[in-house]
Image (tube, rainbow, N blue to C red):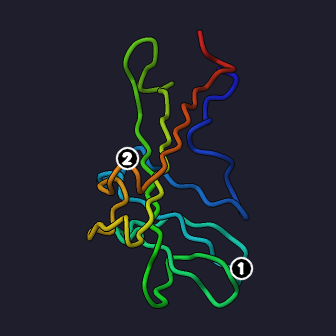
Amino acid sequence: QCYPSWLTGPSGTPYHNYDISESNNANRWQLAFDSVNKTWALTTNGNYNLYLQPDGTYTSTVNGNSTFARRILITYNTNVPYTSQNPEVIVQSVVGWRDKKCIWSDEDPTIAPANCKVTVEEHLTNWKDYQ
C-alpha cells in the first residue's frame, strides 16, 4: 500500500497523533484551540459549548453564557468495499446556536432543533490505495 499509515498521521513533533478509532469515548470529542501556543488539540471533554473570549474568538474556556456549541463526530465505515485496514472515515461537524427562537438545554448540539443547527459532513478514504 502506498499510504499504509493514512489514519495515524505523521509522527514526531510538532504533530499531535490521536488514535480516535480505538477510543471508548462514544464519539465525544472536543476540538480546542490553544491561542497561546497556536495549536489544536482533541480532548474527551463532553462540554461542546463555545464561549466568546475577550479577543473575539470562541473557545471552550468558560466565560459567561454560551450561545454556540460544536460537536465533531468521527465514525468508521468498514462495510464493503471498505475494510478495517482501509475504512471510510466519516467526519461530521454539528454547530448549534441558542437565542430566543432556539431554546435547547443540553450542551450537545446534535439534539438542537433542526432550525437551530447546521451540519457539515465529509467522507474520507485512502483513495490512493482504493481498489
**Exactly how many numbered labels are in the figure?**
2
Q: CA distance from mark 1 to mark 2?
A: 27 Å
Residue 15 rendering spot, x and y as whole percentages: 68, 59
Quadrant placement of the N terminus: top right
Q: Is residue 34 left or right of residue 96?
A: right
Residue displayed at 56% across by 36% down: 122
Which quarter of the picture shows residue 123? top right
Residue 93 rendering spot, x and y as whole percentages: 49, 50
Q: Name the residue that disc number 2 marks.
A: 22
Residue displayed at 60% across by 15% down: 130
Q: Nearer the viewer, residue 46 or 113?
A: 113
Dot 1 amino acid type:
Asn
Q: Residue furthest top?
A: 131
Q: Tell me if residue 106 comes above or below residue 92 in the rendering.
A: below
Q: Is residue 80 left or right of residue 130?
A: left
Which quarter of the picture shows residue 97? bottom left
Crowding near pointer 1: few (<14 within 10 Å), some, many (20+)? few
- Give the label, 1 or 2, closer to the camera: 1
Q: Is residue 29 left or right of residue 12?
A: left
Q: Name the residue that disc number 1 marks.
A: 37
Residue displayed at 39% across by 66% down: 44
Label 2: element kind: helix
In contact (CB < 8 Å): disc 1 and disc 2: no
